[in-house]
Structure formats: structure tokens, C-alpha cells
Amino acid sequence: FLLSSLSNTISHERTTMAAFFFSFATLIIITQSLFARGNALSAKEPRVALITGANKGIGFEIAKKFAADPSFTTILACRTNGEKAAKELGGSGKDVHSVYLELTDDESIAGCRDYVEKNFGSLDVLVNNAAICFNDPTLYGKVPHTPFHQQASITIETNYFGTKKLTEALLPLMMLKTKSVSSPRIINIASSAGRLGIFRGAQDKIDMFTHNSLTIQDLDSHMREFVQAVESGEHAKQGWPNTCYGMSKVG
């Protein structure tokens, strides 16, 4: 699998328009390469792409790019307005679909997997774009204020654990394509908010996330430790950063 990390347009408080255009340009370069290969294979076999959080913003633009390519069937996996977005993108005979997805709901994740398996049999491209961010204001305007100690659990459960569970659920459907001409791909939308600099010199924390022997189980544990520290009000004292979104992207 090709694991591509892209800069997320919805970053932390210091997001700039320059960063936005850089990330969008990076996305275009990577997707153009992917679609060029897709066009070469289109005569041999159709491909299926699923994009999470594709009802607006960068997710919608990614879905639009896939929908414009006749070699792809495009699935918008969204918590809200998925059908509306799919209808907007699905004109002129484009093969666009939508499925409900809530990353904090295990049944929803299982339902998303079952939908893909029942209707398409396998999956070629997974774009993990969906995420929650409590920045105020966001690129989409003002949002109600949420106290920091209430942000940690929902942010980590959505952006880290939810994305991980969805990927694990869909991997078997992607593995079905490993012997085909079209190799499957996973694209994770990353962010500069998840850079190691957010630890502000707390070397023990940096070592935790960069150690050569780091396992998935270790990473899960570290993310839970962060949530516990935030909810207890001890995160700063323990060397954890003051950004839940950033921590979710470190994971």
C-alpha cells in the first residue's frame, strides 16, 4: 500500500492561507499521479475510491476529482449531507454514491464496510479525510466554544481511533486487489499541527512517539494517556501539548 501524508487545510490556530494553498497543491500533485495511472488501467478494470468527510471542504474537492475520472466509482462516506454532496457530484452519468459514516460508532464503521462489500466487492482507494477540530473560529465560521478538557476524548476517538478502526475494517476489501493490476492505496490527510514541535522540548514525549520499537499497541496507549492527562488537568505538567487536534495528528 502507498501511504501518502497530505497537509490538512483545517489545521490549528496558526493555519495560514499559504499553508492552505500549499496543502491543496500537494493534493493535486498526488491525485494527478494516481489518476494518470487510473486512466491507463481504466480499460482493464474499474476502481472504487472511498473518501471520508467528503460532504464539504477538502474532502469534497478530493471526491470531485475522483468523480471526474471515469475509471473510478466514488463513494462519499459522511456523517451529514452525504446524499446531497453525492447528487451534486454525480451529474452527467458520473458513478458517485454515499454511505453514512460516524467514526465514533463501531456499528456505523461496520455498516460502511458492509455497504462497500455488498455493492462493490472490494476497494481500491481509501482517503482518510474526516476529522474533528475545535478551533474557534474555523475555516467554516464560528463554532460554539468547547472547554479544552472536553475536547480530548472526542477528538482522539474520532481522528485517531475512529480512522484506525475504519482502516482496519476496510483493509480486507483492499487486500482483495493486491494481486490485481491496480494496487490499492491508502491516503491519510495529515497536518502540520501534528509536528513534534508541539511537545515544546519534552524529549521523553518525543521519544515515546519516535522510538524504533514503537508498536500500534504502544501508540494506542499513548493516545489514551494524553486523554486522561487532559481530563485530569495534568497534561501541561506531564509535558503533553495544549492541542487535542495536534495530538490526534501525531497519532
Image: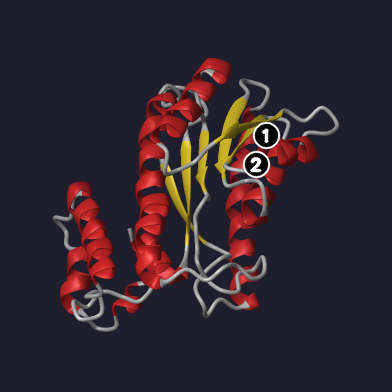
The answer to which quarter of the image holds residue 27 is: bottom right
| Disc 1: CA contacts within 10 A as few (<14), some (14-19) or many (>=20) | some
- Residue that carries the numbered disc 2 in the rendered image: 36
Q: Residue at x 40, y 55 (%)?
A: 154
Q: CA distance from mark 2 to mark 1?
A: 5 Å
Residue 34 position, x and y percent, is: 59, 43
**Counting other residues with Cα less than 10 Å from the Cα at mark 2, is it few (<14), some (14-19), or many (20 or more)?**
few
Q: Amino acid at mark 1?
A: Asn
Q: Are marks 2 and 1 in contact (CB under 8 Å)?
A: yes
Q: Position of residue 92 (x, y in %)?
A: 86, 31
Residue identifier under label 1: 39
Task: State left or right for residue 94 relative to residue 240.
Answer: right
Spot occupied by residue 14 in the image (x, y as percentages of width and height)? 52, 80
- Residue at image position (53%, 23%) is 115
Residue in view at x 22 percent, y 78 percent: 239
Residue 68 is at least partly visible in this image:
no
- Viewer can see residue 135: yes
Q: Residue at x 47, y 65 (%)?
A: 191
Residue type at tag 2? Ala
